[in-house]
Amino acid sequence: MKKEPLKQRLLKYLRTNKGFIHSGELERVVMAWGYKAETGGRELRHLAEDGLIQRKENEKGHVLYSAGEPKEIIPYYVDGVLVTTKIIW
């Protein structure tokens, strides 16, 4: 049986656990799944860059992540074909 990609597992975890989650907690979850904390951090950054999750820093400089509902999703079409979307948080 093929293992689910880490990126997908993290996205599911964030969608299941509402609100912003401290990156340290997510690192512990990733390590419990058998991955290195650094690998989890990289995948979280990629998810944020792709617009699938939200990333913010608190006043202490700690990073938090959330997969809350976006304010708006703007589709971009070329010749009637959806090519990408822009997500506004």
Image (tube, rainbow, N blue to C red):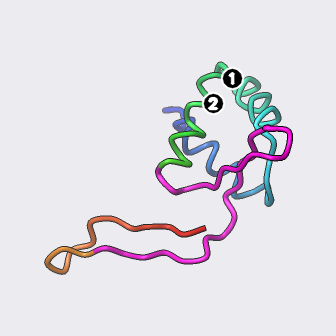
Residue 61 part of the magenta segment? yes
- Viewer-nearest residue: 49 or 1: 49
Residue found at the far left of this picture: 79
Q: Secondary structure at mark 2?
A: helix
Residue 3 drawn at (x, y percent): 53, 32
Residues shaded magenta: 50-76
Q: Residue at label 2?
A: 40
Left or right: 77 in relation to 35: left
- Viewer-nearest residue: 45 or 35: 45
Q: Quadrant of residue 88?
A: bottom right
Residue 28 drawn at (x, y percent): 80, 28
Residue 34 part of the magenta segment? no
Q: Secondary structure at mark 1?
A: helix
Residue found at the far right of this picture: 60
What residue is at 62 percent from the left and 49 percent from the top? 11
- Viewer-nearest residue: 58 or 28: 58
- Compared with 1, 88 (above or below) is below
Q: Residue at label 1?
A: 37
Q: In the image, what residue type sits under mark 2?
A: Gly
- Image quarter where the C terminus lies is bottom right
Left or right: 21 in relation to 45: right
Q: In the image, what residue type sits under mark 1?
A: Ala
What residue is at 64 percent from the left and 55 percent from the top? 54
Query: Is mark 1 in CB contact (under 8 Å) with mark 2?
Result: yes
- Viewer-nearest residue: 89 or 44: 89
Residue 49 drawn at (x, y percent): 49, 47
Q: Tell me the crowding category of disc 1: few under 14, some 14 to 19, or many 20 or more residues within 10 angstroms, Cα based.
A: some
Q: Tell me the crowding category of disc 2: few under 14, some 14 to 19, or many 20 or more residues within 10 angstroms, Cα based.
A: many
Real-space Cα separation, disc 1 to disc 2, in angstroms: 5 Å
Residue 25 drawn at (x, y percent): 82, 35
Q: Quadrant of residue 27?
A: top right
